[in-house]
Amino acid sequence: MQIVSTIAEVRTAVRALHTEKGSVGFVPTMGALHAGHRSLVQIARARCGAVVASIFVNPTQFGPKEDFSRYPRTFAEDCAALQAEQVDLLFAPEVATMYPADASTVVRVEGLRDRLDGASRPGHFDGVATVVAKLFHIVQPDAAFFGQKDAAQVAVLRRMVRDLNLPVEMILCPTVREADGLAMSSRNRYLSPEERRQALVLWRALQVAEALVKNGEQQSARLLDALRSVFASEPTARIDYLAVVDADTLLPVEDVRAGALLAVAAYVGSTRLIDNLILPSSA
Ligand code: PAF
């Protein structure tokens, strides 16, 4: 695996990969890699001739009181994991490479930027859209791979790709879970053993939702009431948002329908976790 940190090096290396291996799949990450990231790389490897990954803890997607400085940085382990997954090229830029001191251009996906995580983390999706647009311009992949766990992020980025006519196929990949159901996340490592147990309430709520919908529940309001009761059984977990939304617009839907997104964010201790479920069709 070749590791590069400058934009010129990426461009040269990707040109060679295109020539030698055909299509290029791209897995952008902030490092602290886990089995969810590895599965994105595996899916990219199965679909594309070459795989490029990036590791960049993007400062512009963190709010002033968020965990940018303590976000886990595990570069050596991450490189070993990507190497084992046969990634061809890793782009790991410095902040100054991605954001010159006087950088003043921001990509804002109006409307979607304020929904779900965008409502509780103002400016977060501007940071995500801006850095992903820049990474797409730098790497110029044929396809990019994102996890279903970040469904709101995917909706924002899909809209950006459509609106800006970026020639990148967006591939949504299934959420990878621990054996007990907790969605893999780089932030899980913040949880104490007791919080780790409490965090399972997110998965329990999603399972209850799936069962209720399969048994015929058709109203979002009633479904959400039932899920609030599940959360009440774990009072240390604090709901940030819990909503049934259209998966493309992230706007609430009143009637549960197949393909709608049930999305949840909750604090367990000081750690904010997210998870979601694409709702099945009802009985
Ligand atoms: O999902 C992430 O890890 C980040 O939001 C991304 C897409 C790498 C942009 O910094």
Image (cartoon, helix red, strand yellow):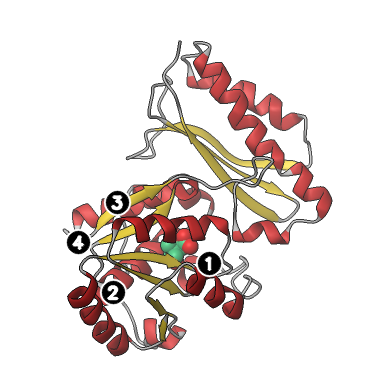
The answer to whether residue 250 is left or right of residue 232 is left
Q: Which residue corresponds to the image point at 29% horizontal and 53% vertical from the top-left? A: 170
| First reached walking from the N terminus: tag 1 or tag 2 | 1
Give me the disc on residue 139: 2
**From where the camera sits, is residue 263 visible?**
yes
Query: Disc 4 vs disc 1: which is toward the camera?
Result: 4
The structure residue drawn at horizontal position 60% and vertical position 61%, both measured from the top left corner, is: 186
The secondary structure type at the circle numbered 2 is helix
Q: Position of residue 118 (x, y in %)?
A: 46, 52
Residue with the mark numbered 1:
62
Q: Which residue is mark 3?
A: 158
- Which mark is first along the chain, 3 or 1? 1
Q: Is residue 85 above or below residue 69?
A: above
Nearer to us: label 1 or label 2: 2
- Tag 1 near tag 2, CB within 8 Å: no
Measured Cα–Cα span from mark 1 to mark 2: 23 Å
Which amino acid, by three-letter code, is at mark 1? Phe
Would you say the residues marked 3 and 2 are in contact, meaning their CB atoms lie under 8 Å apart? Answer: no
Q: Which residue is mark 4?
A: 166
Ligand 1 lies in which image quarter?
A: bottom left
Mark sitting earlier along the chain (3/2): 2
